[in-house]
Image (tube, rainbow, N blue to C red):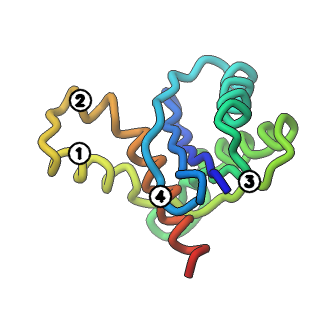
């Protein structure tokens, strides 16, 4: 079962894919946002092209676990994706994934410019891997 992981941001959308067995997440690409309609169609097309069986969208919560404007945007994305895809869509907590992605990329020796261009897809991979780990237990 292949999964698509999504880190939904104001300017960019990080995408990650799992292996066909649904065990290991890998950064896939960073999509530059355009409009909600175009973004959803692009994500749906990627899901179809990559033959995914489920989608995992990170839910950005505040430090105390409360929902925010960003949470509402992620929920709206899920609603729109559900109208284009007939796939299960999960919304796990994504707190600190961007920070974890930035730290990992720095540890791997990437500088500031390279980190900015890769962090969203890396955050999506962390969201997806955390989800995969939680359902395999």
Mark 3, residue position: 89
Please give the name of the residue rendered at 74% of the width and 53% of the height, measured from the top-left corner. Answer: 89
Mark 1, residue position: 105
Kindly report the distance in space between the C-alpha atoms of the residues bearing marks 4 and 1: 18 Å
Question: What number is the disc on residue 90?
Answer: none
Residue 71 image position (x, y, % from top left): 62, 51
Disc 3 packing (10 Å; few <14; some 14–19; many ≥20): some
Mark 4, residue position: 24
**Which of label 3 and label 4 is nearer to you?**
4
Viewer-nearest residue: 11 or 2: 2
Q: Quadrant of the C terminus?
A: bottom right
Q: Is residue 51 above or below residue 60?
A: above
- Quick one: label 4 or label 1, which is nearer the N terminus? 4
Please report contact status of discs 1 and 2: CB closer than 8 Å, yes or no.
Answer: yes
Q: Is residue 95 above or below residue 136?
A: above
Kindly report the distance in space between the C-alpha atoms of the residues bearing marks 4 and 2: 23 Å
**Which of label 4 and label 2 is nearer to you?**
4
Mark 2, residue position: 114
Q: Is residue 20 above or below residue 40?
A: below
Whether residue 133 sits left or right of residue 59 in the image: it is left
Please report contact status of discs 4 and 2: CB closer than 8 Å, yes or no.
Answer: no
Residue 114 image position (x, y, % from top left): 23, 29
Kindly report the distance in space between the C-alpha atoms of the residues bearing marks 1 and 2: 9 Å
Viewer-nearest residue: 94 or 135: 135
Q: Secondary structure at mark 3?
A: strand
- Quick one: label 1 or label 2, which is nearer the N terminus? 1
Q: Secondary structure at mark 1?
A: helix
Kindly report the distance in space between the C-alpha atoms of the residues bearing marks 3 and 1: 28 Å
Please report contact status of discs 3 and 2: CB closer than 8 Å, yes or no.
Answer: no
């Amino acid at each position: 079962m292949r999964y698509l992981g999504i880190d939904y941001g104001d300017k960019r959308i990080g995408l990650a894919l799992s292996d066909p067995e649904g065990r290991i997440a890998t950064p896939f690409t960073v999509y530059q946002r355009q409009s909600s309609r175009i973004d959803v169609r692009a994500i749906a097309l990627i899901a179809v092209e990559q033959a995914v069986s489920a989608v995992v969208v990170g839910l950005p919560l505040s430090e105390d676990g409360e929902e925010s404007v960003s949470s509402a945007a992620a929920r709206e994305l899920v609603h729109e994706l559900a109208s284009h895809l007939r796939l299960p869509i999960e919304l796990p907590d994504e707190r600190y994934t961007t920070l974890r992605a930035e730290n990992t990329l720095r540890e791997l020796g990437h500088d500031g410019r390279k980190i900015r261009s890769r962090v969203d897809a890396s955050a999506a991979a962390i969201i997806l891997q955390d989800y995969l780990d939680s359902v395999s237990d």
